[in-house]
Amino acid sequence: MKLQELTANPGSVKDRKRIGRGHGSGWGKTAGKGHKGQKARAGHGMRPGFEGGQMPLQRRIPKRGFNNIFAAKTVAINVGSLDKFENGAVVDAQALIDAGIIKDAADGIKILSNGNLTKNLTVKANAFSEAAKNKIEAAGGKAEVI
């Protein structure tokens, strides 16, 4: 096989649509823009969310409270979900991701007290609820704040 003998797979390469090149092409005259109207004009670009002068949806719906865009996003994990680890294991963000308990550590991990823990684990997280810390220590483990 030589370099000049290589060809693309059938159907993988298509010619681009040449609009506005005569009515014989099927895309002549109005060039796919229809007849008149705002979208048929040159430079017709409308911003996202524009509804032709009608009050747009993002301004129609009610808004309440304050949404802090700088708030730290913490992932909450219950003590009961830590029971899948082996006895004496060190549980940190990477271990939780590897075990499939969380997808991403975000800005931190907080351990909550829902569920029961039967294994002694060393749990490293950004925050613990008081009850979760007590459950981890009652099972013989350690709760370390990182």
Image (tube, rainbow, N blue to C red):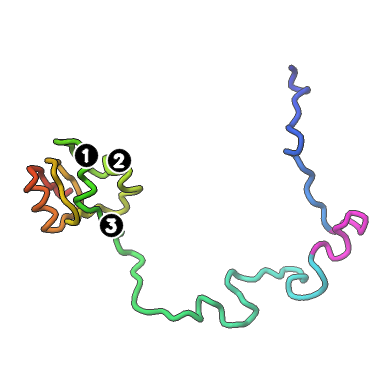
> Residue 85 bears which disc, if any?
1
125 with respect to 136 (left or right): right
x%, y% of residue 121?
14, 41
Magenta-tinted stretch: 20-32
| Type of amino acid under label 1 | Phe
User: Residue 60, relative to residue 124: is it above or below?
Assistant: below
> Of callouts 3 and 1, which one flags the residue occurring earlier in the amino acid sequence?
3
Residue 79 magenta-drawn?
A: no
- Near mark 3 (Cα within 10 A), the count class, few <14, some 14-19 or many ≥20, is some
The residues tagged by marks 3 and 1 sit, at their Cα atoms, a distance apart of 22 Å
x%, y% of residue 90?
18, 38
Q: Residue at x 80, y 62 (%)?
A: 32
18 with respect to 108 (left or right): right
Tag 2 residue: 99
In the rendered structure, are the residues bearing label 1 and label 2 in contact, judged by CB atoms less than 8 Å apart?
yes
| Type of amino acid under label 2 | Ala
x%, y% of residue 120?
12, 40
The residues tagged by marks 2 and 3 sit, at their Cα atoms, a distance apart of 18 Å
* Residue at the extreme right: 24
Q: Nearer the viewer, mark 2 or mark 3?
A: 2
11 with respect to 143 (left or right): right
Under circle 2, the secondary element is: loop
x%, y% of residue 104?
34, 48
> Of callouts 2 and 3, which one flags the residue occurring earlier in the amino acid sequence?
3
Tag 3 residue: 74
| Type of amino acid under label 3 | Thr
* Residue at the extreme top: 1
Q: Residue at x 16, y 50 (%)?
A: 116
